Amino acid sequence: MSYQAPLKDMLFVMNELANLEAVSRLPGCEDATPETAEAVLEENAKFVGGVIAPLNHAGDKDPSFWKDGTVTTTKGFKEAFKQFAEAGWQGLQHPTDFGGQGLPKLVGTPCVEMLHGANLAFALVALLSDGAIEALLTAGSDDMKAKYLEPLVTGKWTGTMNLTEPQAGSDLAAVRSRAVPQDDGTYKVFGTKIFITYGEHDMAENIIHLVLARTPNAPEGVKGISLFVVPKFHVNADGSLGERNDVHCVSIEHKLGIKASPTAVLQFGDHGGAIGTLVGEENRGLEYMFIMMNAARFGVGMQGVGLSENAYQQAVAFAKDRVQSRDLAGSAGPVAIINHPDVRRLLMNMRSQTEAARALAYVGASLYDAAHHSADAAVRAENQAVYEYLVPIIKGWSTELSQDVTRDGVQVHGGMGFIEETGAAQHYRDAKILTIYEGTTAIQANDLVGRKTVRDGGKVARGLIAQVRATAAQLGELQGAEFTSIQKNLERGAADLEAVVEFVVANTKSDIKAVFAGSVTYLKLAGIVLGGWQMARAALVSQKKLGAGDGDAAFYQAKIVTARFFAEHFLSTTGGLRAAVIDGSGGVLALGVDQF
Amino acid sequence: MSYQAPLKDMLFVMNELANLEAVSRLPGCEDATPETAEAVLEENAKFVGGVIAPLNHAGDKDPSFWKDGTVTTTKGFKEAFKQFAEAGWQGLQHPTDFGGQGLPKLVGTPCVEMLHGANLAFALVALLSDGAIEALLTAGSDDMKAKYLEPLVTGKWTGTMNLTEPQAGSDLAAVRSRAVPQDDGTYKVFGTKIFITYGEHDMAENIIHLVLARTPNAPEGVKGISLFVVPKFHVNADGSLGERNDVHCVSIEHKLGIKASPTAVLQFGDHGGAIGTLVGEENRGLEYMFIMMNAARFGVGMQGVGLSENAYQQAVAFAKDRVQSRDLAGSAGPVAIINHPDVRRLLMNMRSQTEAARALAYVGASLYDAAHHSADAAVRAENQAVYEYLVPIIKGWSTELSQDVTRDGVQVHGGMGFIEETGAAQHYRDAKILTIYEGTTAIQANDLVGRKTVRDGGKVARGLIAQVRATAAQLGELQGAEFTSIQKNLERGAADLEAVVEFVVANTKSDIKAVFAGSVTYLKLAGIVLGGWQMARAALVSQKKLGAGDGDAAFYQAKIVTARFFAEHFLSTTGGLRAAVIDGSGGVLALGVDQF
């Protein structure tokens, strides 16, 4: 079966949890009414379900390949990207000035989720273009904007991020690529970049590389890195393509997953120098790159959600179809395996984590919109701070759990899951990159600890915990074992998160290694508590709807069950995570290197 | 780098935790002195490290392939198996009467772990032969034993298990293959078997298939299944090979992992009938097959341990070699990533789980030896009961954790881990089969609940918990934060396991689905508590050795640190698991099928 966008849940989360109605009242967001948004989501769902999803398995089976410096993508990708661009999907969240639709992030986010859910390897080209657009919008000169933005926003060209070098992965201080200023104001760029997603391909006429490099005499470390635009083909004043630039793809990687997405080794300047133009000011490249990175990190979080959804759908379809063994409580013949308790447990694992991660991400998108569009500067700042706290969690937690979810997906399939034809194994392989690129989970966790928790003394975190507690209190007013259970688990989760936040705030300065030994565990704990909070809010809304006899009762009942499952199977783990952070650093750090 | 057997830890566990000395005092085990065992392990380590391990990545890159009914295995496999057989490794644990070495399981187990650790796909051929040998030893006629055992034990031929059919995976009641009695006492076997590991290959002269099929008028369900020996080539009275039998490999699967191991679709009887002979009595086939299954399940547990060890070794080597970013607490240049706290945490996750699973399995092997060799029938029965309780845990828990460990292994490598050349990704792919074949984790968990916990009213489980508490009490007598922490976590773990066992015993009859909804979680909890118990025992022994100034102090110190890490990061999770089992079944089961 092929991926279908989970529109019902997306609309529920967008409207009921992330409050689209409030977003559509923000200045500049007036067009994004719930009705318009629903129409956009439906249209996008049709497109990705019909055009993009069917290419997912094909891309895995017949990946992009390299020959003599050119990359041929999987059959159908080029045509699909043309349709994607022409329908305006690349420009959904980008300014109308440059050919975009100017829709808020909250409306764009479900569309991004669908695209990734349908075909992770395909969607990466759009994700990277989004990042390039963001960086140019923020730091590019007027000339650059005029030259590059409209073709990028309309999907005529695509963009890339060139950070990594063989010796510089997580450690960008080690970047060695050089940029030598020329008399005409341009730079000649030299160096080798690796792991460049869609660094070379045949799906667009031009590729706009954003490249980190050092100018002569730049300071060492991250403070001496500048950002350059290096197009594959030079662009003439009239916008037409000029000569080929001196950047060449010398190979692509043989990878565990996302095989259709070409991961390029790019060689800059081997034939005299690749001509680049400086973005913004010298030595501020990392700052600009972080604009791309933060957009991309949120996007990778959505990859985690989308991929989890796809794996869940496939597992459900298989479990309904596959007949094997009698029902435990019945004596009749064999039944579909969805009736077996452990298959249920696996499916509920998959479902509840996916829904929780989706809800947290959309709420994050809504905060982003308020941070960018609110009329009140204080409101903007407040929302921005909470959004920034959530980004590493949305990226780190959603992608880590996508590895659990896709693993459960294979498991539901039993032996058939291990056979590549079935497609479940592809999700398991694809998922593994998500916790690595755009910053590993440890990098996200360092960000969460350092910039997002310690810097403000835990203020934002405490504010969120207070909101979690307010939701728990509301649950306490409802009758029913399911609400009591959610309340109890949520309250304990909030207390565990609070204890860890206070531990982090109190100890990072005095014993940084002890805190960082638990940073990923803190991130996971925060994801579970905040995701569980969203599921609890969803249960509250659902109960209200059920009481009012409003809408799809089966959907709301299922939402309450799923929230309960999440509480009892994931919120229930926070005590262990708290202990691992607060008591567990000694064991992490005690061995000498030679003892390994 | 290539796998090296962790001899130091293996010898420690074998001697100090699994008490080889006591095993070597059992009747028939007198040759297995600690000195002999050490020599055997060293010799085996040399062999697998030198001959088998170097073929692991090659087997993944250039898997076995099928053409016109024959399977050509990866280059080098045939020669390696010949060396393996000639050196006597296939026969290590098998009776000397048939060409084996007759060593106890406790000595065989580390050798099995090494073989799997070095090369999972290769080792499977030996694992399946072991199973066939066990079944023939137990249920085969004298004629069968005379005909088949010596060539199997000496590795001249190999064996297979033919259970699965397209409609009969976990559900063996659905087996449809037919066996029609002939006048000469043989049977003609007809049917299609799938997922037959090493069902066809070129590494041995003959393949002895053990096949489940139904005789005419056999009862329906599992009580109407018989077991047959169907050799690929008939065997003449003098042991020479006769005509080709009517069993043919029509294809092999394209799999996620263990690619060098051919997974065959076998067609029996398409050209008139495959001639088979009945093993034991009609309709008792499943019972005999479970002999193979139980041996194989323990073996698959060792695959989990071996693979985890391999992934750990590779991650350690990478983490020591890869230089990236400054030390958090230092201001000097970039350091090897093993110095970064989260890399440490990942490595300790891998290390501590691998060591705990190894210890539990070796202790299980020692129980098996006592169950088979003790002079006292009561002692035999008691050990057998505990061994049988542990088998689903050793299989289920060690393999589930191998998926966590191999995932962490890729993560340690960062982007390099996602590139297939590095080899870390192969472990991640290989691991996924381990929780599926020889009974999924859910099947193991059902066995743990039904046959191993409820049937004796929880007696064996309670006996183990009492032993866990005794170890915790011993820890309480030691000074030092590490011992206090291990003690506290172990005591709480024991209480959580006890609560779950009592819940299972009390509720399986009245509410079987509620209990089975938590069966895998119970299995995981039992694995963590019993594995943590072994680590705690290891810490006690290590402390004693350190006090006595006896042996390798760095090793014993590391063991105590690792035990502490396991307690603080895994034993600390048991409260959440307990809650998920006892409170969490409602959410698992509440949705209607249509709500998925």
Image (cartoon, coloured by chain):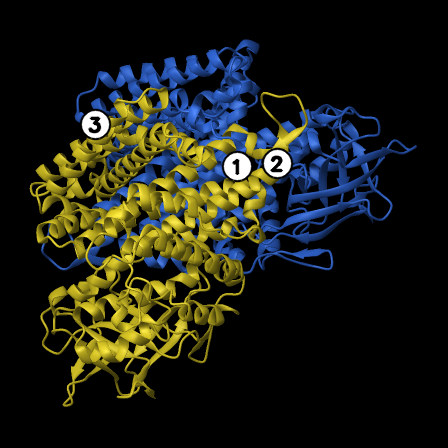
Chain colours: A yellow, B blue
Which of the numbered marks, if any, corresponds to residue B482? Answer: 3
- Which of B94/A239 is in front? A239
Does B443 appear above or below B243?
above
Q: Is residue B432 left or right of residue A207?
A: right
The residue to which callout 2 is attached is B130
Labels 1 and 3 positioned on one and the same chain: yes
Is residue A442 something that shows in the picture? no
- Which of B245/B33 is in front? B245
Q: Is residue A326 left or right of residue B589?
A: right
**Chain letter of the residue carrying label 2:** B
- Which of B129/B190 is in front? B190
Element type at marker 3? helix
Query: At x 26% / y 25%, what residue is drawn?
Result: B486
Does A573 appear above or below A228?
above
Of labels 1 and 3, earlier in sequence is 1
**Chain letter of the residue carrying label 1:** B
> Type of residue at label 2?
Asp
Is residue A354 something that shows in the picture? yes
Does B394 appear above or below A11?
above
Check contact, mark 1 vs mark 2: CB within 8 A.
Answer: no
The location of residue B200, given as percent across then percent down, is 68, 50
Element type at marker 2? helix
The residue to which callout 1 is attached is B300
The location of residue B288, given as percent across then percent down, is 68, 27
Q: Spatial distance from mark 1 to mark 2, Cα to Cα?
A: 12 Å
Judged by depth in the image, the label closer to the viewer, 2 or 3, is 3
Q: Spatial distance from mark 1 to mark 3, Cα to Cα?
A: 33 Å
